[in-house]
Structure formats: structure tokens, C-alpha cells
Image (cartoon, rainbow, N blue to C red):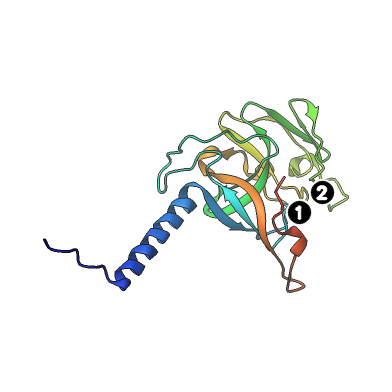
């Protein structure tokens, strides 16, 4: 009876590397993905230089290179911080907060946001410009607007400095990548030093 020829060490390393690569690609496509904050639109919740993990499984991951979304644990809801493809340029990823979902009516009056007639309590929102712009500008006054079914109305927490649904309309679920979970690293570029206090902060 012939004995099995032992596998070479090189072959074992190659197989282990391929398995690791396959697992990494699977997790990135269907479960979790890293994301870096490039702008100030979500201050002070998220700062430039924050690195975070995005849960792609929660809302249902999309099969790569298709428009097919697998079942998720739940649908996005108001208050969720979501990473998505920018509708005007899907090659870019944006991160904003969901303010209203399909069927809800949103209105902004002098920077105050109401959904279905109820003024929102938004401790996360900041305003850096004390002036109020005219209604046709959309930044400080918007709507009333009813969000279409299956779409989301997104706004940055830095309300006076955010390119969001006030300017480009509601977000289609097809462009949603996932729910922002927590900050795993944060780098202060101005000081060239880590922001240790922000590490492992859960994103609310």
C-alpha cells in the first residue's frame, strides 16, 4: 500500500495564505469593512482621521457587482450613522446620519428639524454658522418633504457644513453599504498624534 506523499511546506503556506485571503474578502464583502473619515461633515460625532468599522451584515449585504441585497437583521432607522455610496458619484463613500425613512415627512425651519410634525431632539447636531440662510438655499430651511418608500433622508451632524440630502435628495437603499459601529483608530493630523480617547468609541 502506497503512503501519501507529504505536502511541501511551501504548498502549506500558499494554501493557508489563500484561505486567509478568501476569508478576508468574504468578511469585507458581506460582514465588515473599514472606513476612514475624510471630512468635517459629521463633527463632533466623527472627526477627520477617525477610522471606523462598518457593519454590512445588519442591513443585509449586497452581492458584489450586483444590485441584489441579501436579507439583513433590520432596516435602517432614524438616528443610524450610515456609510453609503455618494449618489452623484458612486465611486466615493459618504457617511451621514439617517434623519427620516420612507413614508416619513421631514421639515427644517431655521435649522430646527421635525419629522412627522415632531421636533427632533438632536444632541449630536452642531451649528458653526450663527447666520440663517434664506429658504431657497435649503441649508437652514427645507420641506416639508415626504421621503419615498425604500429611501432615506441623510444629514451630517455638522449641519452648516454638510453636503447631504438637503442638496442631492433622498438616498436609495441600493447605495447603502452599512451601519457605522465603532472607531478603532483616530489620528490627529494637526498634532501628528493619536487621539487615544476616541479609540473603541461606539458610534451613536
State the residue in front, 24 or 166: 24
Front-most of residues 44 and 196: 196
Residue 118's x, y, as percent? 79, 27
Give x and y (percent) for residue 7: 26, 68
Could you tell me which residue is drawn at 76 percent across and 54 percent down?
A: 43
Residue most extreme to the left? 1
Residue occupied by mark 2 = 126
Query: In the shown orientation, is residue 82 left or right of residue 175?
Result: right
Q: Residues within 10 Å of mark 2 (few under 14, many from 20)?
A: some
Q: Is residue 54 left or right of residue 79?
A: left
Query: Where is residue 191 drawn, in percent x and y?
Result: 77, 73
Across and down, in percent, residue 91 comes to 51, 55
Q: Residue furthest toward the right?
A: 130
Q: CA distance from mark 2 to mark 1?
A: 7 Å
Above or below: residue 131 compared with residue 116: below
Question: Any mark on residue 135, and which?
Answer: none
Where disc 1 sits, the SS reads: loop
User: Which quadrant of the rendered structure holds the C terminus?
Assistant: top right
Mark 2: which secondary structure? loop
Please identify the quadrant where the N terminus is shown: bottom left
State the image quarter where residue 153 is shown: top right
Residue at (20, 67) in percent of width and height: 5
The residue to which callout 1 is attached is 43
Q: How many marks?
A: 2
Which of the marked residues, 2 or 1, is nearer the chain's N terminus?
A: 1
Taking 119 as reference, is 89 left or right?
left
Neighbor class of circle 1 (other Cα within 10 Å; few <14, some 14-19, many 20+) is: some
State yes or no: discs 2 and 1 in contact (Cβ < 8 Å). Answer: yes
Image height check: is 132 above or below 78? below
Residue displayed at 33% across by 67% down: 12
- In the rendered view, tell whether residue 156 sits above or below residue 145: below
Amino acid at each position: 500500500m502506497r503512503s501519501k506523499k507529504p505536502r511541501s511546506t511551501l504548498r502549506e503556506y500558499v494554501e493557508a495564505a489563500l484561505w486567509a485571503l478568501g476569508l478576508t474578502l468574504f468578511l469585507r464583502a458581506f460582514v465588515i469593512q473599514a472606513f476612514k473619515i475624510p471630512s468635517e461633515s459629521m463633527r463632533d460625532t466623527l472627526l477627520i482621521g477617525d477610522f471606523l468599522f462598518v457593519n454590512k451584515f445588519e442591513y443585509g449585504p449586497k452581492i458584489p457587482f450586483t444590485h441584489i441585497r441579501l436579507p439583513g437583521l433590520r432596516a435602517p432607522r432614524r438616528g443610524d450613522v450610515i456609510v453609503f455610496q455618494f449618489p452623484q458619484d458612486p465611486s466615493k463613500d459618504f457617511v451621514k446620519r439617517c434623519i427620516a425613512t420612507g413614508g416619513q415627512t421631514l421639515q427644517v425651519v431655521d435649522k430646527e428639524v421635525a419629522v412627522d410634525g415632531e421636533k427632533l431632539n438632536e444632541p449630536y447636531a452642531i451649528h458653526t454658522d450663527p447666520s440663517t440662510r434664506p429658504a431657497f438655499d435649503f441649508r437652514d430651511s427645507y420641506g416639508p418633504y415626504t421621503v419615498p418608500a425604500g429611501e432615506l433622508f441623510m444629514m451630517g451632524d455638522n449641519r452648516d457644513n454638510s453636503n447631504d440630502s438637503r442638496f442631492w435628495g433622498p438616498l436609495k437603499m441600493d447605495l447603502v453599504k452599512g451601519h457605522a459601529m465603532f472607531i478603532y483608530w483616530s489620528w490627529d493630523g494637526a498634532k501628528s498624534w493619536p487621539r487615544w480617547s476616541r479609540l473603541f468609541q461606539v458610534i451613536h
